[in-house]
Image (spheres, rainbow, N blue to C red):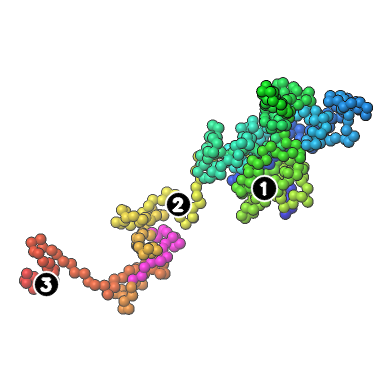
Amino acid sequence: MPILEIHDGQRRQLQDIANTVAGAKKVVVITGAGISTNCGIPDFRSENGLYSLIQSQYDCAASLTPSRSPRTSPSSTLHNLSLPHQNIKGKDLFDSTLWKDPLSTSIFYKFIASLRKRIREEVKATSATHKFIKTLRDTRKLVRCYTQNIDGLEGREGLCSDMTRSKGTRARFTKKVLEKPRSALPILLGSDQDGGCEVVQLHGDLEDLRCTLCQKKCNWEEGRENTLLAGVAPECSACRAADCDRRGRGKRGTAVGRLRPNIVLYGEEHPSADMLSQITTHDLRLAPDVLLVLGTSLKVHGLKIMVKEFAKAVHARAGGKGKVIFVNLTKPPESVWNGVLDYHIAMDCDAWVEDLRVRRPDIWHQQGELKLPMMKRVNRKQTTATNMKPHFAKGDEDKENVQALDLTPNLATPIVEGELITPFSKSLKRSFTSAETPSKRPKHFPTPPSSGRKPLYDYKALKTPAFALNENFRPSMPSKRRKISIAVWEDAEASHRHEIPNSEEDESKY
């Protein structure tokens, strides 16, 4: 199917999408750099994006670096490095091949350290899209958020990005858990409300440094940050401690690794690839009904595969209720994404979120706060009107399973008694009023055994009640084949029984 493109101002289409998001129960979100641009963090591929900034820094560093003569010995300093013959683009500094060129590696260290410092000092608040993702988590609709961003702004909203929390529990989508408000305290691991790793950072983060040798993580200290700003990778303290320990015992020393930013470059494997595979498989089996793709150009090959796999799971919903919504200013190529994306909203992500909030403000309300218990769908035939008082037939107040609803309690209506046939051949008496509709009356009544003779009275000659009886209704009549019961009395002084005398002559006998 072709992608339906929607622009700002198309109210009907935007309202339909808002209703779809509001009615969703399980939502998967995939985000890119476009959700952080309003926070002051540039994206990658725009004219003033990160790739253009890196390219300018590389050109500046290259102009200050003299070319190396073939006769000069190689040096490890930056000023003695020669320029590569090919022109390096900005996106090449996020490729795994940058480790082959010391100049590219040095510029990469400088850029990442300055970017982290800029985010920590200049970005004071998150965007409306980050808050919207948190709202989906609080309203128990968020299955997972997969992000390409390395800024870690989702953590400021309290979203968990720890991969060791794994996939979470399925019980958080059950009715029993949804009726309870989300706890303000930290969610315990393995509890009913545990969502596991709520934000999966596909390209790593800027919170930690990772050793290139032992893969252990270290925090950013002031000395390490200054070292990276100078374009040099600091040593790994764990590797240095192990080397000193071996040398102190008279053994051969070991290699000491270097610390690098905890970022996954193009062509590198995610350090938690096994856990990432388990999480995605778990989320696909949950059968989400809405997939939101926000602020990404869908250029990365791995992300393309992920979006297509989740789109298959969403479109597999019964009745075609699952929808894939793509929000970005750049239009995706239809030759690649036809049949995958259902809607393309050509708006800024924050602008669309604000529009969504105006159209469906109930998305931001938690069910626990509203105190609206979830109710099962009841058959309409079993529903009754309000302000109805139960009306019982005379003498049936104490009987079990005997109850009738008088829909017009202020009117005196005749009561007709009938019997309901049960599968176990047990009759239950019930009273019916004239105000009941024919569809609510019992359609089957027991008929007396036929005696083959003319009935004692003609039921058609009876006065009709205030309402029309069912065609199959026949009042019960006594049968002549029944035995006449004889009433007996027992004298306390006599040991034998006596029949009740029928005449005065019979009384003289006694």
Determine the image quadrant of residue 498: bottom left
**Horizontal side, residue 411 vs residue 245: left or right:** left
Q: Quadrant of the N terminus?
A: bottom right
Q: How many residues crowd mark 1 within 10 Å: few (<14), some (14–19), many (20+)? A: many
Question: Residue tagged by mark 2?
Answer: 385
For the residues bearing labels 2 and 3, Cβ distance under 8 angstroms? no
Q: How many residues crowd mark 2 within 10 Å: few (<14), some (14–19), many (20+)? A: few
Residue at 34% x, 60% y: name it: 429
**Which numbered dot is residue 310?**
1
Measure how far apart labels 2 and 3 are at the Cα level: 60 Å
Q: Residue 229, percent across and down?
A: 77, 24
Region in magenta: 433-448
Mark 3 or 1 closer to N-term? Answer: 1
Question: Residue tagged by mark 3?
Answer: 503
Q: Residue 52, percent across and down?
A: 82, 33
The label nearer to you, 3 versus 1, is: 1
